[in-house]
Image (cartoon, rainbow, N blue to C red):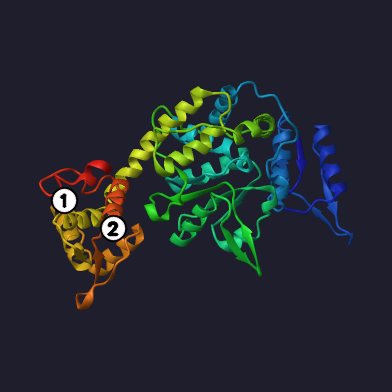
Amino acid sequence: MRFIFQLGYSITDRGESELHAVLATGKTESWWVGKSSGITFWKPPFDVEKGFEASFEEIFNRVELVRTPYYATPAPTGAALYGTTEELFIRLQKAIASQSFIPEQASALLAYWTFSTWFSDGLSLAPGLGIVGPPHDGDLVVRTLRNFCRYPLMLTRADISSLKKVNWHTTPTLLFYDPNLTKPMASLLGCTTARGYMVGDDGGYKDFFGPKAIYLGEEVSVDRTPRCSLQVNLNPATAAVSQTASRLSESTVQDLQNQLLLYRLKSLVKVFNSDFDASALTSDTRAVANALGACIVDSPELQSKLVSLLKPVESQRQADRSSSLEAFTLEATLNHAHAGKAQIMVGEIAAEVNRITLARGERLHCSAEVVGHRLKKVGLSTRRLGKAGKGLIMDVVTIKRLHELAAVYGGAGLDQDENNLHCPLCAENK
């Protein structure tokens, strides 16, 4: 079957009806679309084999909808039966995995996060999602998530201007592609995982609470990762991962949207009253796990699997923290504190930081100014100690806080040696 049509033109209702008439005939036709001026335009021919008419119509619809993205946003058309929670989870995970070159662990974590986007109104925390990996893979994941999240909205970058234009009454899922995310914006996105943080907007204030995913680039530092976010690393495809990403059909997307809607309708109150607690995890990871696990109703097995998947994530985060400049700064400060000093100058701490990093093969030389900023960042504020400059007073409160921070940063300086052998706080926080 052969007919004449050109993509990119604005088609009148009459033009569309003529197109469908051509599709139905199975004959070679000439198709002309006239404007009100009476001028007609010839459309160059496309060959479409019998049985592939729907594919051409899909191309045509996609061209039209890209100019009106709100109409093209995936949304449920009704509620559909989904079976058990495990069956729905497996279907969703497989659909996610089929779209990009990601291993099973990554697709499972993405499925857990996608579930949570349907329940942000029932959660005290809307976990963020940080995607790290090659640009093409990151783009594939963002586009894939758009198919299955609740009220998805893709944005090219994360900035306050874009956030202010979003319709927050629907509690949308924002999907950013922003490998150049700034530290201040990472901080703001971290705050918006919880309710109550307001941002000024034309004389008023808005709460940007809701689920947000962001592609952060191939590598990302800790301070550019929004807090309370699940980080998924898109490792290179392995032999076990398909090398060809299949194109998801519209019917598959629609079926899963409808099934997820019914799951939400049945589970919202249970999610709100969930007592799931990932006690095996700590700090931000535990908070994220509790929110994700609450969205998995009537499936202890899937909840246990979530905790198992997050343990390596937490271990990697702890490893990153323990090798950070903040960790070296805390260790250096502890070394001076264990020496019995009543006050420690920032310059002394900087010198000890440089000694520690040199001993461990790190080519890093820090000034007193840099170390002072790191102390302030972790919550240890320095003060001027006479003409010698700024430093810390080693009172009971500061020493206790120093040990607690060291525990958070991988136990830096808490390992017992001749300097802290008799320090009860080291043993307590280790």
Q: Amino acid at mark 2?
A: Thr
Residue at 22% in and 41% down? 427
Q: Label 2: few (<14), some or many (≥20) within 10 Å?
A: some
Q: Amino acid at mark 1?
A: Arg
Reading the image, the residue beneath label 1 is: 360
Q: Is residue 320 visible?
A: yes
Residue at 64% in and 41% down? 150
Question: Which of the labelled discs sits on residue 76, or is there none?
Answer: none
Mark 1 or 2, nearer chain start: 1
- Residue 380 percent coordinates (x, y): 32, 61
Q: CA distance from mark 1 to mark 2?
A: 27 Å
Q: Quadrant of residue 282?
A: top left
Asked if residue 281 is positioned above or below residue 405 in the image, the reply reads above
Instruction: Please tell me whether mark 1 sits on a helix, a strand or a loop.
Output: loop
- Residue 377 percent coordinates (x, y): 35, 60
Reading the image, the residue beneath label 2 is: 398
Instruction: Please tell me whether mark 2 sits on a helix, a strand or a loop.
Output: helix
- For the C terminus, the image quarter is top left
- Residue 75 percent coordinates (x, y): 70, 40
Given residues 284 and 166, the one toward you in this image is 284
- Residue 89 percent coordinates (x, y): 56, 27
Given residues 336 and 285, the one toward you in this image is 336
Q: Label 1: few (<14), some or many (≥20) within 10 Å?
A: few
Asked if residue 255 is positioned above or below residue 120 in the image, the reply reads above
Give the side of residue 366 with respect to residue 64, left or right.
left
Given residues 23 and 212, the one toward you in this image is 212
Q: Is residue 100 visible?
A: no
